[in-house]
Amino acid sequence: MTDTLVQSTRPDTAVRRVDALVVGAGLSGLYMLHRFRGLGLDAVVLEAGSDIGGTWFWNRYPGARCDVESMEYSYSFSPELEQEWDWSEKYPTQPEILRYVHHVADRFGLRDGVRLDTRVASAHFRDAEGRWTVTTESGERWDTEQLVMATGCLSTSKLPEIPGIDRFGGRTLHTAHWPHEGVDFTGRRVAVIGTGSSGIQAIPLIADEAADLTVFQRTANFSMPANNAPLSDEAQAQRKQNYREHRRAARESGFGVPVPEATRSALEVDPEERRAQYESTWGRNLVGLLTSYTDSIVDAAANETAADFVRDKIREIVDDPETAETLCPRDHPFGTKRPCLDSGYYATFNRGHVHLVDLKKTPLTEVTERGVRTTEREYEVDDLVFATGFDAMTGSLAAIDIRGRAGRALTDKWAGGPVSHLGLQVAGFPNLYTITGPGSPSVLSNMMVSIEQHVDFVADAVHHAHQRGDTVVESTEEAERAWTDHVREVGDYTLYPQADSWYMGANVPGKPRVFMAYIGGVGAYRQHCDQLAADGYPGFAFSAP
Ligand code: FAD
Ligand code: NAP
């Protein structure tokens, strides 16, 4: 470790003093460490898990893989790295991404800067010194100038609010805490609750092993075929030849994935042409259907044409008409809950031992000793798999007692929903940065693109402060207000607020209903951030206590 030991006022403990602390050793935290070290700062990462990798360390359920192409969902900061690493598939599996993360950590010598099995419990700003005191769950204390929350948008998993979960006598699993040794479902009766991306990826593979599988669906989701395939040497070599250009296009795009720019409304083309356009995107990537026309995400009628297209596909795939109708999403516009890519999801319901329960008709009432009960009946199972998602965007931040100037708690400031400047900083919380925080493009993008952009912005802002002889960087209240209003206005212009999604906080009872991501596009967002940096960071105050 590079930290120095400084005697604390409490004789029994030492406070470790560093320039920068990063919380979380996923893709964000590791790159942040690399950038801070590049600036010559003494930086340390604290990670709750027993190894690095974040999302790709925790989510080991069968079928877990990325649904952004491997050659796009990878760091771009090092041309050498992107040339030397070979991906085996179009969409990489969780183990392959984790191997990649380990390769990066080794290649850039990052391991010695990470403290594992260390969960941060609190972070309190000391106004007079302009520094943070960070305390871990085990009572370790750190004193840092910069504090970066790389705690992840999808890292605080959640269980459904139904009674009796502890009562179940069989195996209980959550997709985000999957046992490292794997789970054998051979010959077992399994229930999966949840049909978001995790459930949709896991269900076909669990069905392959289980004797009997019952899927409990509350909201039908839009899913498209991944058409995953091995990546040929030729395809990789070709991409590597023009990787820089491809990265540039990703950074300037709307969702961090280069796709042709739409020029027409979905409603101004005739139905046959539109169908042909949708067909051409089907099975190509996650965003093609949504970006085919200019108004797919802002106009309900335009959106409905895409939604209809997917529903027709579901009816084509699923043999039983009643099951097909249950699987057809109707209660939210296409794309307003994160769409999924799947490998054989809908076809799984053609298998005799796979059953679908529509929780909209017969809601879950409780978990029993032997299984789950709905308003209709009890389902006896051996294994209960929760694919019930996360307290997204704010969950991991709210779990830490973060206090800024004058002891103000972040949870108080965010009681009505998150406010921020650029999704990066919160006024009154100097030197605290949130990587891919609420108010940034974040989860609406290829997150690799957003992560690198945020980390670079933070590193550059800190460097700028130090060059001026300052140590404190703090967003102003005005800048925060203006940005938060802008995020809301852009969100309100779209159909996103119509869905009961985790983007809206709707999956967590009591969470304020606020559209938490910025839908202005990663390209436009980057341009705005770059302009601020070029103009000397208006909206940020620099000082040296
Ligand atoms: P994370 O990877 O979530 O890492 C955060 C880390 O912080 C975790 O290791 C956590 O243990 C640690 N931490 C949290 N709180 C504390 C604390 N108090 N103290 C110490 N440590 C703490 N994005 C895409 O763009 N494309 C995809 O296809 C895609 N697929 C996904 C699949 C799954 C199953 C999930 C869950 C997410 C997926 N995502 C995808 C989003 C994914 O989270 C990001 O792409 C990316 O991995 C986030 O990296 P991160 O480092 O910001 O956060
Ligand atoms: P999710 O999308 O939030 O899905 C959770 C599922 O559980 C939903 O179907 C939800 O229904 C259901 N559920 C929650 N509480 C319930 C309850 N009390 N009773 C019944 N059903 C309940 O979570 P996720 O699938 O883990 O995915 C989260 C995000 O992680 C994704 O949106 C994506 O960004 C990322 N991810 C990506 C991939 C990938 O393919 N690359 C894979 C996994 C995850 P409702 O919809 O009705 O709330």
Image (cartoon, grey):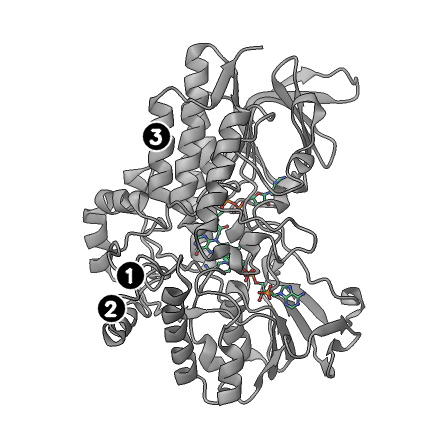
State yes or no: discs 1 and 2 in contact (Cβ < 8 Å): yes
Amino acid bearing label 2: Val
Question: Disc 3 marks which amino acid?
Answer: Asp
**Alpha-carbon neighbours of circle 1 within 10 Å: few (<14), some, or many (≥20)?**
some
The answer to whether residue 53 is left or right of residue 368 is left
Residue 101 image position (x, y, % from top left)? 44, 46
Circle nearer the viewer, 1 or 3: 1
Mark 2 beta carbon near ligand 2 (under 8 Å): no
Rendering quarter of residue 105:
top left
Q: Is residue 544 above or below residue 66?
A: above
Q: Nearer the viewer, residue 517 or 390?
A: 517
Local packing at callout 3 (Cα closer than 10 Å; few below 14, some 14-19, many 20+) is some
- Give the residue type at disc 1: Ser
Depicted 464 relative to depicted 50: above or below? above
Q: Is residue 273 left or right of residue 34?
A: left
Q: Which label sits on residue 269?
A: 2
Residue 530 is labelled as: 3
Give the percent coordinates (x, y) of residue 440.
Answer: 46, 41
Q: Quadrant of the C terminus?
A: top right
Q: Quadrant of residue 215?
A: bottom right
Mark 2 or mark 3, whichever is nearer to me? 2
Element assignment for label 1? loop
Numbered label attached to residue 265: 1
Residue 128: give x, y in percent of width and height: 66, 13
Q: Earlier in the sequence, mark 1 or mark 3?
A: 1
The residue drawn where x is 63% and y is 23% is 132
